[in-house]
Image: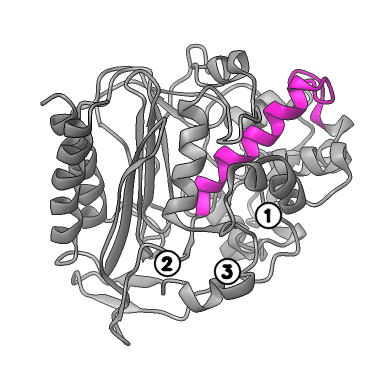
Amino acid sequence: MTTTNSSSIAEAVDRVVQDAAYRVPGVVAGVTTAEEAVYLGASGYRDLGTKTPMTTDSVFAIFSTTKALTGVAALQLRESGDLDFDAPAKEYAPALGEVQVLDGFDDNGDPVLRAPKSDITTKQLLLHTAGFGYDFFNEQYNRLAENHGQPSIVTSSRRALQTPLLFDPGEQWEYGSNIDWAGQVIEGITGRRLGEVFRDRILTPLGMTNTSFTLDGDMESRVATMHQRGADGALEPTDFRLPDPEVHMGGHGLYSTVGDYLSFIRMWLNDGSAPSGEQILRPDTVEFAAQNHLGDLKVKVLPGVIPTLSNDAEFFPGQSKSWAYTFMVNDEEAPTGRPAGSVAWAGLANLYYWIDRRNSIGGYWATQIFPFADADSVTGYLDLETATYRALRG
């Protein structure tokens, strides 16, 4: 990429980021090539109440953008021969052998459970085809939460993992706590907490010093406040904080900065290589991981079952989307200019990223707003992507 391209991208993207301050409390966004970040900027406030300015080193609860790191840790164990994606996952996480399938509710409103027809595999966990869901995207899970005391996955408690399957393993694609369980598989193999595995195998080699399941060092002083958008569109700061995790969840729970996450994206653009030259993943693993592994199944609309946490959500409605290890694949060129075969995903508090290996570019957009798929946040993110590709193509 030429210097002219880089400066054009930075200029175009910064206009989007500065304009976003009129629509969201505050945002940090970045765009990176395989070589370096070509843009990292901020606008607005960390907290609307205190008017603390948003800065590029602000710390965010990154929710499901955690998932891709769990995918990398699992892929590393596949490379070393310690993890067979097609073996019963209960061999590594025995508690998975106790999971049952929810066949609805009886006349008293109690769940009707049965044994699954087959064992869950790690492949199914990573692809969201094992059968687990989320209460904010699934009515049956929400019923378990409201009527049967099932804790939210956001509590990061062991009890929160203990939910039934919505169908037999491999039958459907359903977004849920599957990758939280993949984290348990990784812990079972390594004998270590997931955060320690991340630190030694991913974070330290990539120089990601501001990424952790807990607010370490001075991260606490830089953390962005969560905001809630009301039905009237108004935004209010909240006291929401992730609890001290009993379980390091593979599907959510990390705190990070945009700068750190750009380092992670660069690893994917560099065929798995860290700046030091250390291979986080082998090039053939990167190529394998970024492909569609769903077969004929497709990524579905995420219905907003709990309105305070999520709106209905779908990327590029009407276009085919698949799933890789462990992010969405857009099967067609996106309206933003992102080419088919790129990967991307998001986090519940309106955090979004994409990785385009064809053009060696990717980006990350971070806010702290509930509910998910906030119209102003999504529009800002898509404008970021669109501005990037327009500038890239001159």
Is 66 in the magenta?
yes
Task: Write down the region rendered in magenta.
Answer: 63-89
Amino acid under disc 3: Leu
Answer with the quarter of the image where residue 177 lies.
top right
Q: Residue at x 67, y 38 (%)?
A: 165
Towards the viewer: 315 or 169: 315
Residue 51 locus on image (x, y percent): 28, 83
Question: Could you tell me how far apart the alpha carbons at marks 1 and 2 are, in whole angstroms?
Answer: 45 Å
Please tell me whether mark 1 sits on a helix, a strand or a loop.
loop
Q: Residue at x 62, y 31 (%)?
A: 126
Tell me the tag on residue 58: 2
Please tell me whether mark 2 sits on a helix, a strand or a loop.
loop
Q: Quadrant of the C terminus?
A: top left
Towards the viewer: 202 or 163: 202
Q: Residues within 10 Å of mark 3 (few under 14, many from 20)?
A: some
Question: Could you tell me how far apart the alpha carbons at marks 2 and 3 are, in whole angstroms?
Answer: 16 Å
Is 183 in the magenta?
no
Of circles 1 and 2, the one toward us is 2
Q: Quadrant of the N terminus?
A: top left
